[in-house]
Image (cartoon, helix red, strand yellow):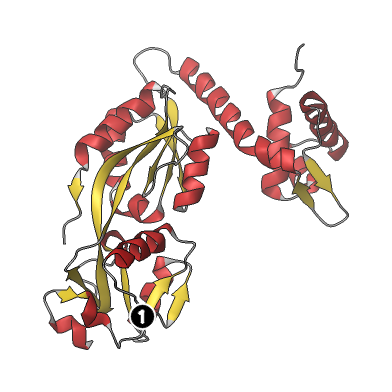
Amino acid sequence: MSINFEALDLRAFISVVELGGFHRAAEALNMSQPALSWRIQRLESAVGAALLERTTRRVALTMVGREMLPLVRRMLDEFDSSIFAMRDLGSRRAGLIALACVPTAAFYFLPSVIARFQAQYPNIRFRILDLSANDGLEAVARGEVEFGINLIGGSDGELSFEPLIDDPFVLACRHDHALAGKSSLGWADLEGHPLVTVSRSSGNRAILDAALVKIGVRLDWSFEVTHLSTSLGLVEAGLGISVLPKLATPGENHPIIVTRPIRDPEVSRTIGVVRRRGVKLAPAAERFLEMLLGTWRGPVSG
């Protein structure tokens, strides 16, 4: 049984999803709306299920469409990479590396490794999905990316986790706060101060809560936010203090916020590389991963 569709059918599907409708997608692809609709219908016929739900106001993905979306993106990436590779046959090396990374790690150390890698392989393109820990795991498991940089590994055995760095949780407060004068702190020192924390859906919160339960410490929070950057904004405004990973804190030269280590015990998260077991990486991704592992291992300084 043959499946009959073309790369342009896949691009039509991606364009409708990313641009939010048939009109803008047709303009972007320089085709008529009937021609675009025919492309989508042919792809749906090949799959054997509807991919899009059409209403008078919007276009939404069906359940099958949501499952198809990362696969279609991966197929187009591989197709485009093959075309570029054929154009660059000879001494030039081309390709695409797709990876998922928790935002703090993407900001802290990923750019420096990419810069070194591109000095050797200037034609390699990168697609970086800066996702939460859970979303990053799902992207790796679905094959949407080749590997991930994450703080947790998969629990189903299909994913492997290789430790990369240890990132301690520290106190962040204003430089004029009472706790800023201490060189290091214990968890009991935080009591009585308004605390800013991230929500329980965060992987960082889960790691911190689990570690504190073991030592019998409970932190009562005054503000709960979704993003670590928001917590820093509240700290900067003098509304409270925050406990967050060292990677997520400003540099030492920040004019308002300072960080202090928290001891007895020190609690840290481990950031590592997540990949699918038994799946061989593309040569470019394998070379980049080797450079990444060779550059960053051990604790985060500070």
Q: Is residue 38 left or right of residue 148?
A: right
Percent x, y of residue 30: 75, 37
- Evaluate whether residue 169 shows in this view: yes
> Is the residue 149 above or below the residue 169 in the image?
above
Which quadrant is the C terminus positioned in? bottom left
> Is the residue 226 above or below the residue 1 in the image?
below
Which residue is more in the foreground, 160 or 171? Answer: 160
Percent x, y of residue 52: 79, 42
Which residue is more in the foreground, 209 or 96? Answer: 209
Residue at figure coordinates x 46%, y 75% from the top left:
224
* Residue 277 falls in image quadrant: top left
Which residue is more in the foreground, 130 or 95? Answer: 130
> Is the residue 139 above or below the residue 1 in the image?
below
**Total numbered labels:** 1
Type of residue at label 1? Leu
Which quadrant is the N terminus positioned in? top right
Q: Is residue 141 left or right of residue 97?
A: right
Percent x, y of residue 56: 88, 55
> Is the residue 91 above or below the residue 238 in the image?
above
Residue at figure coordinates x 41%, y 33% from the top left:
275
Residue at figure coordinates x 73%, y 38% from the top left:
64
Percent x, y of residue 164: 26, 43
Which residue is more in the foreground, 261 or 41? Answer: 261
* Residue 183 falls in image quadrant: bottom left
What residue would you read off at disc 1?
A: 195
Estimate how packed mark 1 is, as few (under 14), some (14 to 19) or many (20 or more) residues with alpha carbons within 10 Å: many
For label 1, the SS is: strand
- Evaluate whether residue 256 shows in this view: no
Q: Is residue 33 left or right of residue 188?
A: right
